[in-house]
Amino acid sequence: MLFGRLHKNPIQLPVKPVEKWVYTTCGYCSTGCSIEVGVNKAGKAVTARGVETADVNRGKLCLKGIYEFEVFESKNRGVVPLLRKDRSDGFQETSWDEALKKTASEISRVQAIYGRDSFAIVSTGQIYTEEFYTLGKLVRAVIGTNNYDGNTTLCMASAVSGYKRSFGSDGPPGCYDDFEHTGCLLAIGSNLPEQHPIIYYRLKEAYDRRKFPVIVVDPRVTMFAQLADIHLPITPGTDLVLLNAMAHVIIKEGLEDRNYIQTHTNGFEAFNALVDQYSPEVAEPICGISARMIRKVARIYAEAGAAMTIWTMGINQSTHGSDGVVAINNLNLITGNIGKPGGTSLSITGQCNAMGTREFSSCSGLPGYRLLENAEDRAFAADFWGVDAQHFPEKRGLTETDIFPAIERGEIKGLWLIATNPMTSMPNSPKIRKLLEQLEFLVVQDAYADVETAESAHVYFPAALWGEKTGVFTNTERRVNIVRKVVEPPGQAKTDLWIFSQLAKQFERAKNIHFSETPEAVFDEIREASKGRLCDYSGMTHDKIEASRGIQWPCNASQPQGSPRLYADGRFQFEDGKAKLIPLPFVDNNEVPDESYPFWLNTGRLVEHWHTRTKTGKIGNLNKFSPTPFMEINPRTAARLGIQAMEIVRVVSRRDSALVLAQLTERVAEDAIFIPMHYYNCVNRLVLGLLDPYSRQPAYKQSAVRLERVVDQKTAAESILSERTY
Ligand SMILES: Nc1nc2c(c(=O)[nH]1)N[C@H]1C(S)=C(S)[C@@H](COP(=O)(O)OP(=O)(O)OC[C@H]3O[C@@H](n4cnc5c(=O)[nH]c(N)nc54)[C@H](O)[C@@H]3O)O[C@H]1N2
Ligand SMILES: Nc1nc2c(c(=O)[nH]1)N[C@H]1C(S)=C(S)[C@@H](COP(=O)(O)OP(=O)(O)OC[C@H]3O[C@@H](n4cnc5c(=O)[nH]c(N)nc54)[C@H](O)[C@@H]3O)O[C@H]1N2
Ligand code: SF4
Ligand SMILES: [Mo]
């Protein structure tokens, strides 16, 4: 039963004549559903279905996956490379050769004048792993800038940082099968039914069979909260205090797993001394959850036999994002819940291939979870690529969120954006536009020519999209799955892989470095580079992946079918094999509501839309559900302020203001509003986006705003409609 309905009424696509079914993996979220796209005699994608034999989705798809084949026909795709001398000129169509030459010469020019790190690159979590690997080689071995990052800093950086601090390496240890074995599921800041509908379906299947407590921690009464056994409507930004208090109760009541702590962890004494200060009575006024309830959930968790925690952006996008992840790991380490069936810390990943970029893009290091900080790792990559190890920096450069301030300071003069749209997704968006305009050279590589960033670009590279090329994605549970090419890219659009390998040819210093040009050949390099690493792909091939409907790494000679879990033997990635228990004092540094800005502004997602809507905004079957920016507001708050349902309201923060429709709903508390992130020139005008000190991820979920009624509704409506409404 999905979403609590007794009789499901699944979406039925009209039956169309299909010549062949092509196996792919969904290119939206990181659930990793297998899709077969039906192609007709004319080579056109006409329908789609979930793959019954795929363990992840077992024939199911959410509405984004069902309609994904419609992206091939969506409007405003980039079909020809574009070039302009300066921003006052219009774009001219150009050849690939010219566009690549111009880009390479501008990169070289900027680096020659201002130094090699003055050219920055920001990529994505949404291209294939083969493409990431090739980009990494181009950046680290050829271009040489250290200011190279991905939009994953906006997304999974806190999870990565937290895993590294606790376990010595990135890599989610659990899997979806853990739902089948768990005795308790704690979900923090994750709206699974809307954002990962098919992971939710897997959870619900297990839950319906075996009823176990599901506890949801979210300030908002999400669909997940409504379906939970216990909902903890936490005060925004205080999850760390709740987690410390749960550990406090567990240790005070002797419910911890002493044996596991002694054998597999370091740091218990200092950790215990810290959580000792966080009694449920101390926590109650900070996180707004009663001491009685904190004791109750701590006991349920510790006594469950096997218990697991999942989390997403409610934890990661916070000033204590990385600490929140470490606190979740602490909780699971003291209860012996890592690497065992049903006992795990499973971050629910965001984008379809946010995992692949972490593994092989060399964004924050070198391929295969290797580190720039480690001489042996640098030597390996140098040897593998045929460059001098001296060429590599000895520590990682700036993250995306530090690259923009560096543009403002004049340290970065050129930028290459690949499959990401910071004009809509970064906090403080009006400032982002100014900074893009300040660059001497901006190149935008995107599947859509109408992406907002292209307005400020000097060069635009039209990219092939999901399903117009072959390659692999890694999902939330470390499962590598393949997307086969379904249709040809439109016009002159080229795969990201082609663009990277052709751009490499423009540089003299790439002459002696080999760039493989087919996804299969790149995959072979990845297999080789990953041998013996935690993210070992050496036992996989494209065909084997398709036949298995995805394989979970590590996959090698001793684990040829892959590995469902990490750390089952309790050996972690630190030198001595032990995990770390880390004391985490709570620092309250958020922007919080006050007299002038009395409401919490919470932001996030809707099931029907994908991020900045470059894709879903153009698919009628998705966009029709919410074509216009809106906020969720509590009906009592609305009544108090005289706001009617569907009235346009001005939301004002210390940064800027935005116009939204009012949707009256009990999903939000009386002192909070929620605005989806999907609309251009909307919520990210308002968000402060303080950064987590470890991960540099922005706190998108906590800002303070006030609400102003708008007298002239007609002009306000025109203003909203003048924005990108698609
Ligand atoms: N339909 C759809 N699905 C998607 C995406 C999409 O754009 N559309 N994007 C994908 C990506 S990249 C990501 S990262 C994931 C995100 O997936 P989720 O993180 O599940 O989605 P969000 O809506 O960003 O935020 C989740 C919840 O965090 C809660 N929250 C806010 N503040 C706090 C807090 O202080 N504490 C706690 N505990 N919770 C808080 C919010 O109320 C919200 O319900 O979704 C992926 N799936
Ligand atoms: N207020 C607020 N802001 C947020 C968030 C939030 O919760 N609240 N969440 C943050 C998070 S978790 C994320 S992940 C970011 C996402 O932010 P972005 O990455 O900026 O958003 P997308 O719309 O996914 O941008 C992807 C771009 O890649 C293009 N594209 C798609 N496929 C391909 C391809 O194969 N090749 C190329 N070259 N281009 C392609 C698309 O057209 C699109 O322009 O937003 C962040 N911003
Ligand atoms: S749950 Fe995620 S991966 Fe599965 S069909 Fe929906 S968007 Fe695609
Ligand atoms: Mo994300």
Image: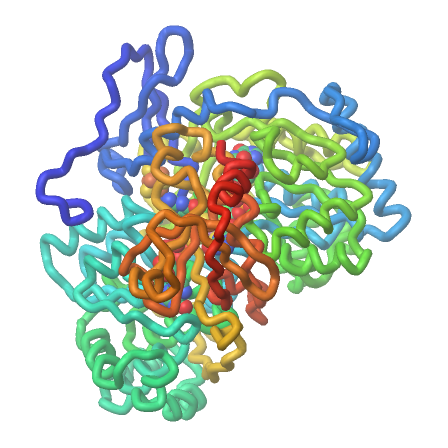
Quadrant (top left/top right/bottom left/bottom right) for the N terminus? top left
Residue 193 left/right relative to 697: left
Residue 451 left/right relative to 75: right
Q: Nearer the viewer, residue 198 or 690?
A: 690
For residue 628, above or below residue 599: above
> Can see residue 565?
no
Question: Residue 375's x, y, as percent?
Answer: 68, 62
Question: Residue 208's x, y, as percent?
Answer: 11, 53
Residue occupying the point 22% across, 53% down: 203
For residue 184, above or below residue 4: below
Please name the colour scheme applied to the rendered image: rainbow
Residue occupying the point 52% across, 73% down: 596
Residue 439 left/right relative to 721: right
The residue sitting at the right extreme is 113
Q: Nearer the viewer, residue 96 or 440?
A: 440
For residue 355, above or below residue 545: below
Question: Residue 403's x, y, as percent?
Answer: 69, 56
Residue occupying the point 71% across, 39% down: 456
Residue occupying the point 19% across, 47% down: 3
